[in-house]
Image: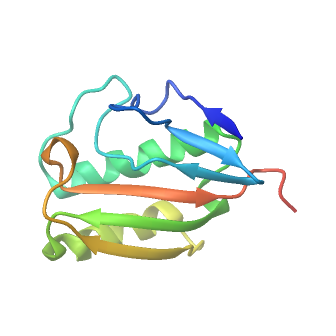
Amino acid sequence: MEIIESSNAPAAIGPYSQAVKANGLIYTSGQIPLTPAGELVERDIKKQTRQVLENLKNLLEDAQSSMDKVIKVTIFLENMDDFGVVNVLYAEAFGDHKPVRSTVAVRTLPKNVLVEMDAIALPYDYC
């Protein structure tokens, strides 16, 4: 197992790793809308979703992967009324690639954010 650390995504805010590479797969921790510098993005679903997707992209790249290598994404939403907006931005971020996905409504998220996502991906060198 290899622990992945990235300065291009927010540092872990608890006792966990940003990502782990194990058995040929990359598992990211849930990404919330913090900038890599640790600043919380304005409480707006579009801005927060864009930051979460950017964090995932950066973290995957630093783990020698990319968005087009993602197998599975889990999305956690504070409000399912935001699903449509998140879905459009998600589709833009992944383009023609369509990983499997689950979307879960939750009561609250860390730092009272609106959205969180995690991913499982293959590395660049996977055939």
- Residue 103, given in percent of the width and then of the height, sits at 34, 74
- Residue 91, given in percent of the width and then of the height, sits at 44, 70
Q: Nearer the viewer, residue 107 or 68?
A: 107
Q: Nearer the viewer, residue 23 or 85?
A: 23
* Left or right, residue 16 beside residue 107: right
In which quadrant of the rendered view does residue 74 lie? bottom left
Which residue occupies the extreme front position in the image?
15
Residue at 49% in and 37% down: 18
Residue at 18% in and 70% down: 82
Q: Nearer the viewer, residue 107 or 38?
A: 107
Quadrant of the frame with the C terminus: bottom right
In which quadrant of the rendered view does residue 16 lie? top left
Vertically, is 113 above or below 105?
above
* Left or right, residue 125 beside residue 71: right
Residue at 29% in and 73% down: 104
Vertically, is 40 above or below 97?
above
Which residue occupies the extreme right position in the image?
127
Quadrant of the frame with the N terminus: top right
Vertically, is 47 above or below 13?
below
Residue at 56% in and 75% down: 98
